[in-house]
Amino acid sequence: MAHEHTHDIAPTPARASAPSACGDCCSACDGVTVAPVEQQVRGGQRFRVPAMDCAAEESEIRRAIEGIPGLTGLRFQLGDRSLRIDGEPQATVAAVEAIRSRGLEIHPWPEAPNSPGDGDAEAHVHDAEAGTGLPRLLAALVLAIAAEGLSFFVPDAPWSNGAGLAIAAAAIALAGFGTFRKGLSALRHGRLNINALMSVAVAGAFVIGQWPEAAMVMALYAIAELIEARAVDRARNAIGGLLALSPDTADLQQPDGTWKSVPVGNVAIGATVRVRAGERVAMDGLVTEGCTSVDQAPVTGESLPVDKGPGDAVYAGTINQTGTIECRVIAAASQSTLARIIHAVEQAQGSRAPTQRFVDRFAAIYTPAVFVLALAVAIAGPWLFGWTTLAAVYKALVLLVIACPCALVISTPVTVVSGLASAARRGILVKGGVHLEQARLLKAIALDKTGTITEGKPRLVEWQMLATSMPRPRAEHIAAALATHSDHPVSRAIAAGLTPNNVEARNFAALSGRGIEADIDGERFVLGNHRLIEERGQCSAEIEAVLRRHEEAGRTVSLLTTASGVIALFAVADTIKPSSAAAIGEIKAMGITPVMLTGDNQATAEAIGREAGLTDIRGNLLPEDKLTAIRALQQQYGATAMTGDGINDAPALAQADIGVAMGAAGTDIAMEAADVVVMNDDLRRIAETVRLSQRTHAVLWQNITLALGIKAVFLLLALFGSASMWMAVFADMGASLLVVFNGLRLLRNPERN
């Protein structure tokens, strides 16, 4: 079924409108400074949410602003309690007001996004909180252990109760101030979130005299929240850390020819920069001078260096390994391929996958249900089961701790974010958790031919002598001399495949649609196609047979001839990529049906398709024919992906359940229409994406099962009086950490996972 695509590889520009468009009388604007539109285009507007330090608050914020028109992306950083909102100015103001309506404070970040000091400010805040938060919580844990020790070892001492009460209160104050503040705010707004549950549970335990357990519960809970926040940020920052690979400065050529190191933000498109051996490329560019090998792993995931020479593209963040090169800058630093990849992954991380939506809906029902159960136990327990009032209240408080949905809520985002980051590290850009989850459901994959299965560049694959009147080296030199004088792709392929020489061609002439001719050593030579040779009356039955063999193999043939006859034949073809046959084999092995859809003639398509291992090969297709073919495949097989790299593939990419663009050679239109972009044009990444989707789905349900299973066990233990509050919080903390670290496993190399 067709679907809309809402995530672009490039940042989505906000519609130009004045920050004051909402009017002076709009109370939502109070205290909100909306960033200029150009800043929003570059990276959205950043805010600080002091109370946002766990996945529960993140989920609550998502629910609060879901459905606001004009929002294009969200970027959460739990570690430094920051939120970046991408969207139109009015949408940003509406989102801020919606967050405040939930009782959460939100303030503009002190510095503008992507300003030179932004990274430093973020690191400073993050380090400051990490430095003060963990020691404070460890001190709270020590005090809670001391309170438990007093209660256990000297319960009857006259000073024990007073000392234990004071120590427990200090522990709760150190660890729980933020939780109580958020919990009271949630209760005032009629919401039963995790902070409300913990606040009620700890306060209740303190009131009934279980202050050592109350202190232990709060300390363990706060430490678990801190660990979870850091773990989620680790997954979310796994891809963003690649941006640090790009140098801050570049060697810029000055008007007088000298070189000067300048900030990359000051380098204009079209300028010339220099990259020495061993340095990282600072900006995207085209090589103008020099040859080298470049490690492109940060951008494309390729394990082997790629040779680069004049005319070849290089990407910011990649490593120049062997020689000094000069490059003409083709993109601003903020719009480099690496920056665009990272922005797209951040947008994808800001969207919720289907499983995450399910879990959020389930948690919204689960938490109030257990709260009602706890209330029923406290009220009806003494009447139904003969429990004392204190025993019934204690059991109810244990149930409240068990009801905390943190492990359940955090189980999905950390897994999806890790999967997206893992894919990006391998040169696979997945534009949302929904596509990462759905890839495992694919039953058919349609493949374009040119640039997808094949290299997309014609090469000389064979040449042979058809006459003995001229030595083979002489024929090669003459053909090369003719081919170098033409810009036609076939001629360029012939020239590239033959040995360069010093043969001089004079009086060169292009024969439109047929070939080229020139004088060499006083004799007129022609390098032309089948049609030209027939027009000259030089096509014999023997030559026709040879031509037929090459043409049936999907090759384009040129012939070298003189007035006396045909001398040699040169066959050019768009060869399949070395990885295509293996990739199609992997796709078949997974039970997915591969199909070729191409605009080339059927004979050429058959030749390439058979070589690649395909059986369903469809040629002579216009863009609308490909679109019809995708619909037919969806009817026949079910979920269908389309893989292509050209403008003519864009309609089929949009129609497919998952559209895959071959990024390195792909057009911007195809990349924008696609859900998955393969940055290094390796078809094997498609099967890898499906395998990653299968692993992500498995880990998601492992986490959900772990979270709910542990909750269910302790729920039963609590009802039968075999669980205490600190055991319940240990179970909650343990479940949370288990699902977090299980999700982080996806950050490993997918091929070794």
Image: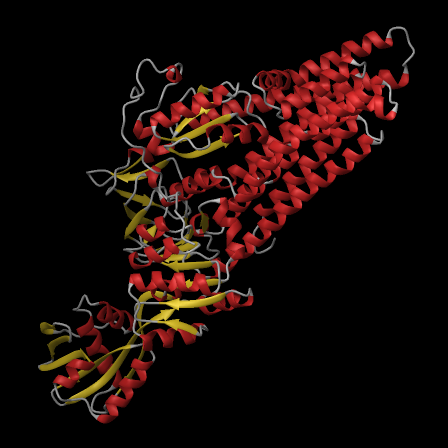
Looking at the picture, tell me which residue is in the foreground, 13 or 481. 13
Looking at the picture, tell me which residue is in the foreground, 305 or 168. 168
The image shows residue 573 at horizontal and vertical percentages of 31, 73
In this picture, is 634 found above or below 738? below
Q: Is residue 433 left or right of residue 727?
A: left
Residue at 37% across, 44% down: 8
- Look at the image and tell me whether residue 663 can be seen: no
In this picture, is 174 found above or below 711? above
Residue at 49% across, 67% down: 593
The image shows residue 296 at horizontal and vertical percentages of 42, 51
Asked which quadrant contains residue 737, the reply is top right
Looking at the picture, tell me which residue is in the foreground, 521 or 583. 583
The image shows residue 196 at horizontal and vertical percentages of 64, 21
Asked which quadrant contains residue 171, the reply is top right
- Look at the image and tell me whether residue 655 can be seen: yes
Residue with the most extreme front position: 383
Q: Is residue 268 left or right of residue 277?
A: left
